[in-house]
Amino acid sequence: MFEKFKQLKQLKELQDSVSKEKVEVERNGVKIIMNGKLEVEEIKIDPAIDRDKQEKIIKECLNEAIKKIQFAISKKMAGMAGLGF
């Protein structure tokens, strides 16, 4: 039974650690910051870039940020499982 509590504590610590992760992706003056909960914390755009190009850049930045966060999460989970990367 105590083993289950230990595992629960480890999962809570992992969840807390993951939620504190942040990634920043910047491309052509457009910057996105995303946290480990996959929430966008900040978007900065360059008003000198036309709307169509900005939309494309924002989409690319979001996709890259999601991939980076997913990688960071999988790395932490592997570390917790003792697999290490």
Image: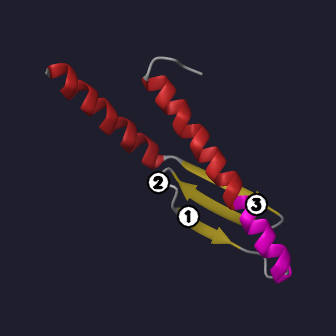
The verdict on residue 85 being magenta is no
74 lies above or below 20: above
Q: Which residue is mark 1?
A: 40
Q: Residue 20 location, x and y as percent?
A: 45, 48
Residue pictured at 65% horizontal, 47% vertical: 67
Tell me if 19 is positioned left or right of 52 in this view.
left
Is residue 41 or residue 65 the one in the foreground?
65
* Distance from the alpha carbon under mark 2 to that under mark 3: 19 Å
Q: Quadrant of the C terminus?
A: top right
Count the marks. Answer: 3
Query: In which quadrant of the rendered view does residue 68 lie?
Result: top right
Q: Nearer the viewer, residue 40 or 31?
A: 40
Where residue 61 appears, x then y in whole percent? Answer: 72, 60
In the image, 58: left or right of 79? right
Q: Amino acid at mark 2?
A: Lys
Task: Tell me where residue 39 appears, x and y as whole percent.
Answer: 51, 61
Query: What residue appears at the point 26 percent right and 32 percent down from the top-left corner?
Result: 9
Check disc 1 and give the amino acid type. Val
Q: Residues within 10 Å of mark 1 (few under 14, many from 20)?
A: some
Could you say which disc has been placed on residue 37 in the image? 2
What whole-number distance in Å separates the C-alpha atoms at marks 1 and 2? 9 Å
Label 3 to label 1, Cα distance in Å?
14 Å
Q: Position of residue 71 (x, y in %)?
A: 61, 38
Checking the image for residue 4, the label placed there is: none
Residue numbers of the magenta segment: 49-61
Q: Quadrant of the N terminus?
A: top left
For disc 3, the marked residue is 60
Seen at 31% across and 30% down, the residue is 10
Which comes sooner in the sequence, label 2 or label 3?
Answer: 2
